[in-house]
Image (tube, helix red, strand yellow):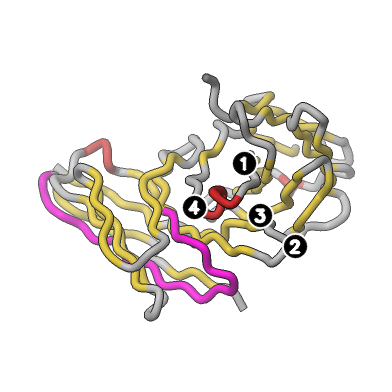
Amino acid sequence: DAGVTQSPTHLIKTRGQQVTLRCSPKSGHDTVSWYQQALGQGPQFIFQYYEEEERQRGNFPDRFSGHQFPNYSSELNVNALLLGDSALYLCASSHQAREAAREKLFFGSGTQLSVL
Amino acid sequence: GQNIDQPTEMTATEGAIVQINCTYQTSGFNGLFWYQQHAGEAPTFLSYNVLDGLEEKGRFSSFLSRSKGYSYLLLKELQMKDSASYLCAVRSWRMDSSYKLIFGSGTRLLVRP
């Protein structure tokens, strides 16, 4: 049973370009959350998707957008890349049920994005 | 506002015990997580507390006091491989059942021989 999987592992882009990162949740999970972790900082919440809709959003500009597919997988899109978007992007999944209130959260291995 | 504080760096000796503290102020508290993160890798789950008290798991223990907004992670019998960053995170729950993790900046632990 695979856990949370993310692709690609590493990515190099230049300023102004657009990037798409992908996340497959753990089997049985239906909720996906995305986080950005800059070097030396803790992860920052970007947004959460459930039932193909964005349910909550952190303090990130509209350049950051996402999507969730019927199979619960998710994409994170970043437009007009800035140097400051260089970070580790993490995905976490869970199941939206009452039990989810006490569910442990596990992260995928992340995508390291470098913007030159 | 929502805030999580933990020390930036700590140093300890192999075989010793170290306690990493975390204080928090958040709304919709629904549990506190500790993660370990080695450089260049994703965080790995260590412990989870939602009720007051101590949770023990091998060499690692975590404590929570909700009334004080305080938690600590206790690492016993330190090993060199425990050198890593330790992240404290609070799950903040909303009425629509959505939630997010709010992380501290992490504590870099250096274990010396």
Residue under numbered circle 1: A95
State left or right for residue A35 relative to residue A85.
left
Alpha carbon of mark 2 to alpha carbon of mark 1: how far? Answer: 24 Å
Residue under numbered circle 4: A102
Instruction: Tell me the residue at 73%/51% (across/down).
Output: A47
Circle 1 — which element?
loop
Residue in the foreground of this view, choosing between A83 and A63: A63
> Which quadrant would the C terminus of chain B be assigned to in this image?
top left
Closer to the eye: label 2 or 1? 1
The numbered disc on residue A45 is 3
State left or right for residue A24 relative to residue A20.
left
Instruction: Tell me the residue at 54%/49% (across/down).
Output: A99
Residue under numbered circle 2: A59
Closer to the eye: label 3 or 1? 1
Q: Chain of mark 4?
A: A
Circle 2 — which element?
loop
Alpha carbon of mark 2 to alpha carbon of mark 3: how far? Answer: 8 Å
Q: Few, some or many C-alpha atoms within 10 Å of disc 1 (few <14, some 14-19, many ≥20)? A: some
Q: Chain of mark 1?
A: A
State the image coordinates of residue A93 (x, y, percent, origin top left): 62, 39
Q: Which is nearer the N-term, disc 4 or disc 1?
A: 1
Count of marks overlaid on the render: 4
Residue in the foreground of this view, choosing between B24 and B52: B52
**What residue span does the magenta drawing correspond to?**
B15-33
Q: Which is nearer the N-term, disc 2 or disc 3?
A: 3
Residue in the foreground of this view, choosing between A116 and A71: A71
Residue type at numbered disc 1 = His
Looking at the picture, does residue B95 appear above or below residue A112? below
